[in-house]
Each structure stands twice: as C-alpha cells, then as structure tokens.
Amino acid sequence: MNRITVVLASLLMAACATAPKTDSPQLSRTKNIPAAANSNTGTLSAEELESRRLAAEKAEIQALQKQSVYFDFDQFSVKAEFQNAVQRQAEFIKAHHDDVVTLEGNADERGSNEYNLALGDKRASSVKKSLGMLGVSEKQIRTVSLSDEKPRLLCHEEKCWKENRRVDFMHKPSL
C-alpha cells in the first residue's frame, strides 16, 4: 500500500510539472506570431524597405498638403498662429532637396479679379519669404495665384470667406 501511495504521488507531481498541451491549433499559432514577426523584421528586402519608405513619405506629403496658412480680410502677412505650420513645411522641404513645393495663393470672392489675383500672389510670396527665412532654397519654391478660382467653401458669408483666404502647399516629390 505504501508503494502505491508513493507511485501515485510521483505520478501526480509529474503531471503537475509538465506544460499543458493545447488541442487548439489557433492558440499555438497565436503564440508563434510575435516570434515570427520579430524574425522577419531583419530580413526585409531592399525593395520592401524602399516601398515602406515611399509609403511613409507619401503619407507625410498628404498630411502636409492638408495644412494651409490662413489670412485676415485684405491681408497677406503670415500670422504668428501659422508659424508652426510653416516651420513643419520648411523642415520637410529642406530634408528633400530635390522636391518642389508650389504655394497656391487664394482669395475670397470679394474684390475684382485683378485685385484677387494680386492678393493671392502677395499671400503666396509672403509664405515663400517665411520659408526662405527658415532656410528653404528658392529653387524649391514656386508660387501661383489662384485668385478666387479654387474656393474651399462656396457660401457667401464670413465662415466661407475665412476658409478661402489661404495659401495651400502642393508638394511635388522628385522621382
């Protein structure tokens, strides 16, 4: 009887000491995912790395192109509240020496066509000057006045006019 007790106790301890087996292949695959992912990060091909770099750069350009510098009515000075946006643009442009950015100056619908063309040009030139003071080469900057031809909003009240008095950044990366 004593022998049986010792054998049972040994079996019980051995059973507790072994790792439980999983019947679920889903669970065992899940455990291996991090290890597989970690082992693949060092083995990416040059094409895959370049593809990822280009995708990240494209996403950054899209984000930068969503930024605009807005102006008060009949004004073309870059306001202090937009200096951070201009700074981010400048950092990107300087890091991409072969890229070109077009500054699109816009005006609201009020004023004559000639006046709005001149105002859009002054706004684009003002942002160009700010970028230049931050070290961006003139060769990388183009300006164009779109006057009131590219409104962001079409209503005829201040909330729309405010949105339409702006300079947009159109990045053209080098190929």
Image: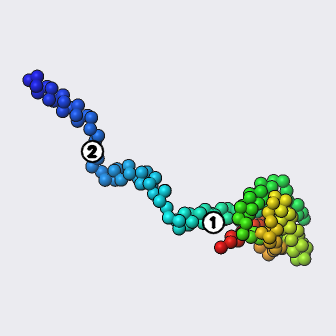
Which residue shows up at 89% across the image and 73% down it? Answer: 118
Q: Secondary structure at mark 1?
A: helix
Q: Residue at x 43, y 51 (%)?
A: 34
Left/right placement of residue 3 relative to residue 44 reads left
- Viewer-side residue, 56 vs 163: 56
State whether residue 156 appears in this view.
no
- Mark 1 closeness class: few <14, some 14–19, many ≥20 residues within 10 Å: few
Query: Which residue position is annotated with label 2?
Result: 21
Residue projecting furthest to the bottom:
113
Direction top: furthest residue: 2
Q: Which residue is mark 1?
A: 58
Q: Position of residue 171 (x, y in %)?
A: 71, 69
Earlier in the chain: of badge 1 and badge 2, it is: 2
Q: Are marks 1 and 2 in contact (CB under 8 Å)?
A: no
Q: From what the image shows, is residue 19 above or below residue 136? A: above
Residue at point 66%, 65% (across, down):
62
Q: Is residue 43 left or right of residue 171?
A: left
- Secondary structure type for disc 2: loop
The three-letter amino acid code for the residue at tag 1 is: Lys
